[in-house]
Image (cartoon, rainbow, N blue to C red):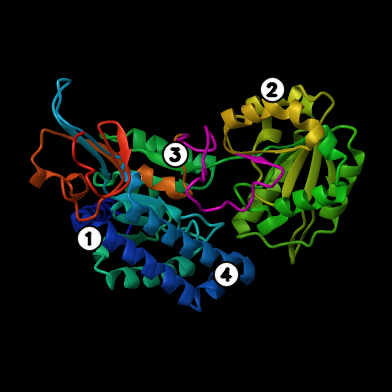
Amino acid sequence: MSVATAEPTIRAVAAASSHAASELRALGRGGRARALRAVAAALRGDHDLVAIASAETHLDEVRLRGEIERTASQAELFADVIVEGSYLDAAVDHASANGPELRRLRVPVGPVVVFAAGNFPFAFGVFGGDTVSALAAGCPVIVKAHPDLPMTSMATFGLVRETLAGHAIPPDALQIVTEADAGRALVEAPSVAAVGFTGSAAGGRALFDFAAARPVPIPVFAEMSSTNPTIIAPEAARTDVAGLAQQLVSAVTSSAGQLCTKPGLIFLPRDASALIEAISELLAVAEPRRLLSSNITERYLHRLAELRAGGAEERTPGSVSPSGVAPTLVAVPIEQLSGTLTEETFGPATVLVTYAAFDDLAGALSSLGGQLTTTVHAVDGDFEMIEGLVDVAAATSGRVVVNGVPTGVRVAWSTTHGGPYPASTSPSSTSVGASAIDRWTRPVTWQSTPDRFLPDELREDPREPVPTRVDGVLLVGASSARESS
């Protein structure tokens, strides 16, 4: 469904989404779970999406097939999440001398607008993590398609919507808007209850401000900018130099550096000449890759000019040719790390930050602001030294990685993909993993309410029981979950 950008039309789309909410919720968690699993199967069985996306993004088909599998598995995870039910945070406090009976459950917030990303056409696209988690929660979704992916967006939308319709999901529970300038009108539509966004800090902040300025403000869950600092401790810098260099370079160049978790700042000892040289040599021979679009290429080249103007020493000069963009490596002493050098570069470039004193790293990390990830590489001889630094990383990041790379976000129950601003606008949430569903629910408490008026999960004999905290005790089984002790 493509719509015009006129505000009344956008409002009509949002109103239709709102009307679908009660029908979507009435399906129950089991019905929504079956629909999500059906979409997962349909994605795996489709033979056209990968070729369409490859033509629009220049991403290779192997990478895209892996992303299709990740997207399907993500849908299955959220099916498991809603069947298991602990996301509802059900609680019952029976009437006592302390007060009346209270029963609490999280409920869907209502229609959600999702801004699809361009660097992950499936996993963060039309049926990406924001969309599938919102539908799982029982919230209708209006997708704002990415302007660089018109064919991929519509092909995905058609497949998903047809599959959902075959499982009693109302048509208006998933709608799409393709016009590039419709974003503000969507956020300001009165029926919209929340927004999900993956993209630049400027774009996410603009949507956040639009939402805050509404007569009734709504939350914007924006995953935005991160340099993902990576710290190499002194002993680690001298251990398995070749292996560590390969690991770092692979993370920098994966998907042509167009990952929000790419290591953009690599801190390493100033005297780690062997590691610095190994990284430089590997980047120098890395094959040029085409970026997602001409606009992104233009912005990337502008960003490289900013890095050079910021005083960084160019160790591996990137080149631009018809075959693509070659990686760029620049270096700067930690004492000169400031301003533009601390900002994200979307593309195959990274900044080596050399330090003489390990104690300087904690202050440097804190000054960078919120991050999606912080990584520390260390061996036994470094462990005592890095203990405080790991604590700083946890205070400033959504995910702390030790002896690994931040790229390749696992979709699981324990995943956090978010962080303090400017990594995201909501550091208490995640856009990946089981807990991503929490963004689209809110708690409601029923006081002294007869059973017939309660949601099924809170009734004395629920059809679909969930883990429930009864009078302070968490009960996971279905039996006697509502009885007072």
Residue type, numbered disc 4: Arg
The residue tagged with tag 4: helix, strand or loop?
helix
Q: Are marks 3 and 1 in contact (CB under 8 Å)?
A: no
The mark nearer the N terminus, 3 or 1, is: 1
Q: CA distance from mark 3 to mark 2?
A: 26 Å
Span colored in magenta = 400-427
The answer to whether 258 appears left or right of 153 in the picture is right
Cα separation, mark 4 vs mark 2, equals: 41 Å
Dot 4 or dot 2: first in sequence order is 4
Q: Which residue is mark 2?
A: 363
Mark 2, Cα crowd under 10 Å, few <14 / some 14-19 / many 20+, is: few
Residue 158 visible in the shown view: yes
User: How far, Cα to Cα, is label 4 from label 3?
Assistant: 28 Å
Asked if disc 3 and disc 2 are in contact, CB closer than 8 Å, the reply is no
Residue 10 bears which disc, if any? none
Q: Amino acid at mark 2?
A: Gly
Name the residue tied to disc 4. Answer: 65
Where does the N terminus fall, quadrant-wise? Answer: bottom left
Instruction: Please name the residue that numbered disc 1 is placed on.
Output: 27
The answer to whether residue 187 of the structure is visible from this angle is no
Decide which of 7, 337 is in the foreground and name it: 337
Name the element at disc 3: loop
Instruction: Indicate which disc, 4 or 3, sits on the residue closer to the N terminus.
Output: 4
- Which amino acid is tagged 1? Leu
What distance separates the C-alpha of mark 4 from that of mark 1? 31 Å
The CA span between labels 3 and 1 is: 26 Å
Taken as a whole, is the magenta stretch helix, strand or loop? Answer: loop
The x, y position of residue 406, in whole percent, is 64, 46
Q: Is residue 258 left or right of residue 277?
A: left
Circle 3 is placed at which residue position? 429
